[in-house]
Amino acid sequence: MRALGVVILGFIMLIIAICLMPEAANAAQGTAIYYDPPYIPCYGRQNLGVMVAGASDQIWGNRAACGKNYRVTCIGGANLAPHPCKSGNVVVKIVDHCPSPGCNGTINLSRDAFSKIADLKAGKVKIEYTPA
């Protein structure tokens, strides 16, 4: 009977540990660039502020990404720019689509959002992103 109690306690501890795991463990990776307005496919000319982004085909999902929020963190440079990343992350709302073949990033951040997590001179950075 005591062995069963130990097994149950171990199982409960495992469940708690899984629930407390950092969100980054489930983060997808990609690249980010920045772009300037207009940011229009989801909401026309409606101004949704500056913490917005365009989604590549990988995320877009036939407009399913419109209005969804993503937490984006810079994890490294995608070119030779020195010190491309800043600490912290930014939460952006998907308001635009960046279709293939011309899309150069997984998430195309507004200039303001990009500058929160990376040096603008880097131009393109490696990122982790999760739904927020």
Image (cartoon, helix red, strand yellow):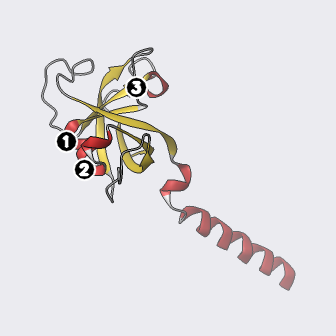
Q: Are marks 2 and 3 in contact (CB under 8 Å)?
A: no
Observer-nearest of 23 and 88: 88
Q: How far separated are the C-alphas under marks 1 and 3? A: 18 Å
Point out the tag, 1 or 3, that comes first from the N-terminus: 3
SS assignment at label 3: loop
Instruction: Find residue 112 and name its label.
Output: 1
From the viewer's perspective, tell me whether residue 55 is left or right of residue 120.
right
Q: Please, what is the three-letter code of the amino acid marked with disc 2? A: Lys
Residue under the image location 43 percent in, 17 percent down: 62
From the viewer's perspective, tell me whether residue 4 is left or right of residue 126.
right
Residue 95, picture quadrant: top left
The x and y percentages for residue 31 are 44, 37
Q: How far separated are the C-alphas under marks 2 and 3? A: 19 Å
Label 3, residues with CA under 10 Å away: few <14, some 14-19, many ≥20 = some
Q: Please, what is the three-letter code of the amino acid marked with disc 1? A: Asp
Compared to 78, does 37 lie above or below? above
Label 1, residues with CA under 10 Å away: few <14, some 14-19, many ≥20 = some
Q: Is label 1 or label 3 in front? A: 3
Residue under the image location 56 percent in, 62 percent down: 19
Compared to 9, does 65 lie above or below? above
Residue 98, picture quadrant: top left
Instruction: Find residue 104 and name its label.
Output: 3
Point out the tag, 2 or 3, that comes first from the N-terminus: 3
The x and y percentages for residue 101 are 44, 14
The x and y percentages for residue 80 are 41, 43
The x and y percentages for residue 109 are 29, 35
Q: Are marks 1 and 2 in contact (CB under 8 Å)?
A: yes
What residue is shown with label 2? 116
Residue under the image location 31 percent in, 56 percent down: 86
SS assignment at label 2: helix
Is residue 119 visible in the rendered image? The answer is: yes
Observer-nearest of 44 and 123: 123
